[in-house]
Amino acid sequence: TSSVHILKFSFVFRALPAEMTSKFTDNPFKPSSAVTTITDVFPSDGPISTLPPELIVGIFQAYSACDDSPWRLACVCMRWREIALRSSFLWRHMRLTCGEITDRYVTRWSVPGVGKTILTVGRAQVCAEKEELDQAILRSGSSPLDIDVIFSWRTDFESPSYQLLAQDLLSSIFERKDICSRIEQLAFTLTHSSLDPSTFPIPNSLPNLKALEWVSHNPLWAPSFRRLLPECKKLASLHLSFPVLSSLSDVDMWRNVHSLVIHGSGHFNFSLGARDLDSVIPACPSLKELKVTPFVAWPRESTPPITCRQLRILKLCCEARHLQRIRAPLLTALDVYELSSSSHQRTEDISLDFPDLETLVVQSPDPRWIFKFNFTKLKSLGVIIAHESTLMKRVGTKVTVWENIFRPDGFPTVKNARFEAVGRTSLFMAALASVPNSERIEIIPDTFQDPEFGLQLVRQLYAPGTVSMCGKASHIQFGNRWCCFGVQRTSFEPSLRALVAIRQGWPTPLQSLRVYWTMGIEPTEYV
């Protein structure tokens, strides 16, 4: 299994000389504009030379789960390079594009025997010319293929040379039956592109296609995919834009779909998107995962009751009262984005039946409805309270009424909790009291509301009489990469150190206390 491979990788990694491990540890996932020369490798000596090839291949299989270039494996030593080039599964990921590559995540490699620099984005080989694509296909051997086609907006995308190059690349893939039969994952991104689909070879069949991501705002591509998709009998995962969904809503292709992700477009009529979902979702009896863009409110008032017997993961945007239109007895993860609460929505009018729910994330101006239900298996809870003015108008005008949103010991089974709202100590203390057994806690305040919020909250966490407050939490985080603490660091750190010192004497001591001081900067660890 992959976990066994990772353990083996860790054991071998510790036995490598420092000059070899630096090839991995020096920010392996950080792109660089510099060119890494593959000829700069070390000879096969030391403990690494005693490992059998099958164990090294096992390490490569574990490493391939990371989104990083397989060329990095070829940098360790000559023997690894030879085995990596013979391991065709490492080279199954390809990205087809045209023209100059400006992606900031590109990594450049200089390889012996290749006349130009090889580019990779994550684990995918970048193929901007037919020769590069042919070499990538050759390295992939007979392995199943994961192909990402990106023809996005460029200043020269309407030029004949761009059109011919794009056509040449697609022909190298889709006009070869042996290649089409190996494609298991295909991503097609055609944003802001006027490429004429009639000039491009779209295959009549991809017999082993399991996952398709199709992002296009050009309706001219719809007929090609309407013809192709019903023939993809193994297709189980779809990631589509709403214009594409609209063109496919009446196609008989949904029976085997297990995962459906729908996102929006700024130029699309979202009421039509909701209507398409009304017809598509009942046609997916095997659906286990459904994620819908927050720009489309679904389900809605006119949505008929829908039963999804296999559904496990659900992410959508709607009023809470419309959730009861979906019957999903096996649902384990629910993510709800409630832009606004209807003036006639009442908590007592909401009735949900998700007995196996383990993960709940709610973004709402008034999330009090979640406390009506007894989620006996809930392990992870995230509550984001938006639109303070709306909430204060509905709940009251005094600060003390914020505590009424959360109920003490409301979620005793929760182990991971995340709360995001305006920075009011009373609100967050009430929130923390609702998850008394949580082991991991994230507190993300809008500190612009109250600059002293952080000081008040931290002092409350270790003040006399609050020993039971988050007493089982071993990991606490304040802020995140996008919402940092606005208090002065010099005045805040003494309270943090006091919190750590006191909590270390509790039955469950702190293992991690992180604070994000500056937006976009890594946090400071105080344990």
Image (cartoon, rainbow, N blue to C red):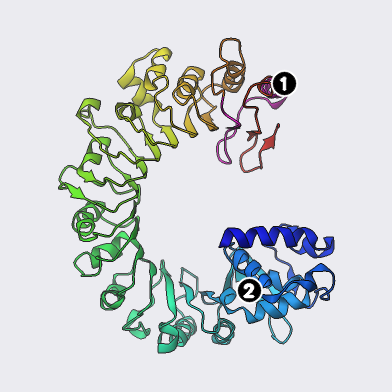
- In the picture, the disc for residue 119 is 2
| 21 relative position to 130: left or right | right
Nearer the observer, 186 or 357 = 357
Q: Quadrant of residue 390?
A: top left
SS category of the residue bearing label 1: helix
Q: Which residue is mark 1?
A: 494
Q: Amino acid at mark 2?
A: Leu
Q: Is residue 211 left or right of residue 515?
A: left
Instruction: Look at the image and say whether residue 107 sits in the magenta stretch.
Output: no
Separation of marks 1 and 2 at Cα, in angstroms: 48 Å
Residue 220 rendering spot, x and y as whole percentages: 29, 74
Q: Is residue 502 left or right of residue 189?
A: right
* Quadrant holding the N terminus: bottom right
Q: Residue at x 63, y 69 (%)?
A: 58
Place of residue 481 in the rendered image (x, y in percent of width and height, measured from the top left): 58, 41
Q: Nearer the viewer, residue 100 or 511?
A: 511
Disc 1 versus disc 2: nearer the observer: 1
Q: Tag 1: residue type?
A: Pro
Asked whether 78 or 431 is in front, the reply is 78
Q: Check residue 480 in the rendering and tell me which mark sits there, or answer none.
A: none
Q: Earlier in the sequence, mark 1 or mark 2?
A: 2
Asked whether residue 100 appears in the rendered view, the answer is no
Q: Residue at x 71, y 22 (%)?
A: 501
Task: Estimate how packed mark 2 is, as few (under 14), some (14 to 19) or many (20 or more) residues with alpha carbons within 10 Å.
Answer: many
Rendering coords of residue 187 (x, y %): 43, 69
The image quarter containing residue 261 is bottom left
Q: Can residue 493 be seen at all in this image of the molecule?
A: yes
Q: Residues within 10 Å of mark 1 (few under 14, many from 20)?
A: few
- Note whether 442 is above or below 229 in the view shown: above
Tell me the magenta residue range.
472-501
Q: Position of residue 487 (x, y in %)?
A: 63, 25
